[in-house]
Image (cartoon, helix red, strand yellow):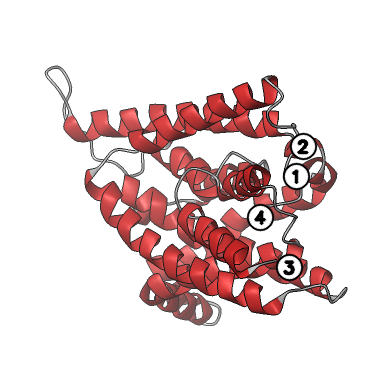
Amino acid sequence: MSWFESFILGLVQGLTEFLPISSSAHLRLTAAFAGWEDPGAAFTAITQIGTETAVLIYFRKDIARIVTAWFRSLTDKAMRSDHDAQMGWLVIVGSIPIGVLGVTLKDQIEGPFRDLRVTATMLIVMGIVLGIADRLAARDEAGGKHRVVRDRKTLTDLSVKDGLIFGLCQAMALVPGVSRSGATISGGLLMGYTRESAARYSFLLAIPAVLASGVFELKDATEGGHVSWGPTIFATVIAFGVGYAVIAWFMKFITTKSFMPFVIYRIALGVLLIVLVATGVLSPHAGESAG
């Protein structure tokens, strides 16, 4: 892998990991269009750890508060009613679906789900779902001539049931093109949560899933010793820096703006991808091992 390739792939990983547009789809399409070889499982695993490190740093105060309260609640019964302690349990509960489905659907995830036609379909379908969820949220926030403004739920209203639904939405991202943040944010909006709350829980929920998967992939991939450590570490630093900037921008953006630009982009990209595959410009399996 060249330094230029590592720079571009790290940039793509950092730009797309937290936006509701599917990082796995963009990494794969970048490799397919550029005609590059597969960067390898270790590269993907390490760069994902880089972007999740950005989450850890950006939400460091929230995470420290939640972890501290959760550990205290193990021995102090009075702490079990504390919101931060409950959040710790809810992140664990929400992580169960992706862990279970990731193991049981492993063959499908590494096989049929990798078809670019599936990726294109998911880009379009989940784009439409995100658009519907966003419109419902906007309607509640704005009210109207015959509608009153409705208060939407925040993370203080998060329950075990909602946490599991968030987790199931996150697990949908095992299919390339879905988008981890896109699916969980859509689920949150449809359950009546504010944009900010849905996005915040989405990012917190991704931490254990991505770090666990990254560590396991890294262990397996590095056993063969075929890792270009210089370019890989360089890409990870790029992904971390860009990812941190994207989180900061995105959390401010969603407090006042709609998700519609992402909806339009997803649908347009999905349609373009279907056309390219249908006309033979791209093979359904182009860049299959990337992302």
- Residue assigned mark 1: 288
Dot 2 alpha-carbon crowd within 10 angstroms: few under 14, some 14 to 19, many 20 or more: some
Q: Label 1 vs label 3: CA separation? A: 16 Å
Quadrant in which residue 93 is drawn: bottom right
- Residue assigned mark 3: 42
Disc 3 vs disc 4: Cβ atoms closer than 8 Å?
A: no
Viewer-nearest residue: 34 or 253: 34
Viewer-nearest residue: 205 or 237: 237
Say left or right for 255 vs 127: left
- Residue assigned mark 4: 96
Where disc 4 sits, the SS reads helix
Residue 90 visible to an observer of this rendering: no
Residue 4 at x, y = what percent? Answer: 58, 65
Give the amino acid at mark 3: Ala
Residue 21 at x, y = what percent? Answer: 49, 42
Where disc 3 sits, the SS reads helix
Q: Which mark is residue 285?
A: 2
If you read the primary sequence from the N terminus, does the residue marked by circle 2 or circle 4 appear first?
4
Give the amino acid at mark 2: His
If you read the primary sequence from the N terminus, does the residue marked by circle 4 or circle 1 appear first?
4
**Mark 3 vs mark 4: in front:** 3
